[in-house]
Amino acid sequence: MHATRLFLLYLLAVVIVIILGGFVGWYFFLHIPQTKEAVVDAARGLNSSINPFTGGSTQDNIRVEVAGNSTSTAEVPTSALWQVDKTPVAGMNFVKHATSTSLDYIQRANGYVFRADPKTKTVVRLTETLTPKIYEAFVSSDGAVIARSLDDSGSITTFMATVGATTSKTSTSTEQNTLRGSYVAKNISSVVPSPTTHSIFYTIPNDIGGVDGYTALWDGSKPKKIFISIISHWTPLWLSDGRLIITENPADDMPGYAYSVSNDGTMTLLVGNVPGLTFLPLSSSKAVIYGASANGVLSLFAQGAASTTPNTLNIQTVADKCVWLGGKSLIAYCAVPTTPPTGKFLDQWYRGVIHTSDSWWKVDVQNSVALEIYSPKTTNNVDLDVERPTIDPSGNYIAFINASDKSLWMLNIPQ
């Protein structure tokens, strides 16, 4: 009897150990990976309730007025298209060096800065500073970085940093540089770096429900207020010729306006009263490309000079999907949805509710002609929703983010 009781106690103890072991296994092999996945999803911006960098439009404005490895190497693809990074990216820019040009970019989940070589198709990690959940980032023309995130209280943070030359060229070394910099004012609603000086322009909410606009040095020092508005949502663009352009965030069927802003705060209207206005001026020129969204239809216009009449192009897209080649040729490249968008496209696209499958077109503004030059769907069987396109100084490469998953791509422009 005593032996039977002792056996049952041992059996019960074994069962308890098995149950505890199963719980520990669940925690480490199921719970923790799900938690990590949730963190990565948040860093991708999939949780829109905590991502303030996707909101704001002309419609909102009117409401206010009225109310691991350091290096990876891929095979050089035969295609003109290269997927630089499958991991979600927060921002990028081409950086010109003494004898080469690189594409520098920041990953969303960890804030690491990488450098891609367009010719060799190699990628080097420049920094080891872990900065999770970077929702938006910018890279200046000299490789400095603006990284934007949220703190524990939900306030928008903006970190201004510089990156030195990498000390590692191999995949086994861990001697990357530290990302060094400082935080500037909290809750900056929009920011853009100067392409020619180590300075920034940013807007920040004011007491009248709009924003004030400031220029400042890279570390946020010596701020100078040059802009005051009762409208709260603006997209700034700083051109290499020194002009600062601000455009109301677009909304379908709502009139939008674009201005240039001088150092003394003088505002000059460039384009106005255009429903769903998206705007792209050319540096050192009066040429512009701008889009409209009215009655469920997208239109794109090109204007070679201020004195000429804008011409309607034979493509339906937004100016935010276009880049200028630069120089005096008046050539631009635009990503155009293969299926023309309908309905409230801008409102849904900027919120990430819908996505497009784009092909690339070459736009001759002087002759108002647009021709398709590359289709990722036809050539590579991939659907790419182009956002934040940028072109390298030589005019050979266009880098862009795929809006559907935030991956980074590069197109070797077909000649």
Image (cartoon, rainbow, N blue to C red):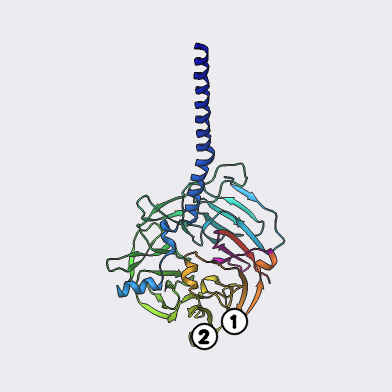
For mark 1, what is the residue?
Answer: 314
Quadrant in the picture for residue 216: bottom left
For mark 2, what is the residue?
Answer: 310
Using a 10 Å C-alpha cutoff, classify the residue at mark 1 as few (fewer than 14 neighbours), some (14 to 19) or many (20 or more): some
Give the residue at x 56% y 46%. 167
Cα separation, mark 1 vs mark 2, equals: 13 Å
Q: Which residues are magenta?
A: 380-406
* Image coordinates for residue 60, horizontal then vertical, percent: 37, 71
* Image coordinates for residue 62, horizontal then vertical, percent: 35, 74
Give the residue at x 39% y 79%. 268
407 over 180 or under it: above or below: below
* Image coordinates for residue 105, horizontal then vertical, percent: 54, 57
Amino acid type assigned to the residue bearing label 1 in the image: Asn
Between 290 and 15, the residue placed more toward the observer is 15
Amino acid type assigned to the residue bearing label 2 in the image: Pro
* Image coordinates for residue 109, horizontal then vertical, percent: 50, 51
Classify mark 2: helix, strand or loop. loop
Is residue 173 rendered to the left or right of residue 38?
right
Classify mark 1: helix, strand or loop. loop
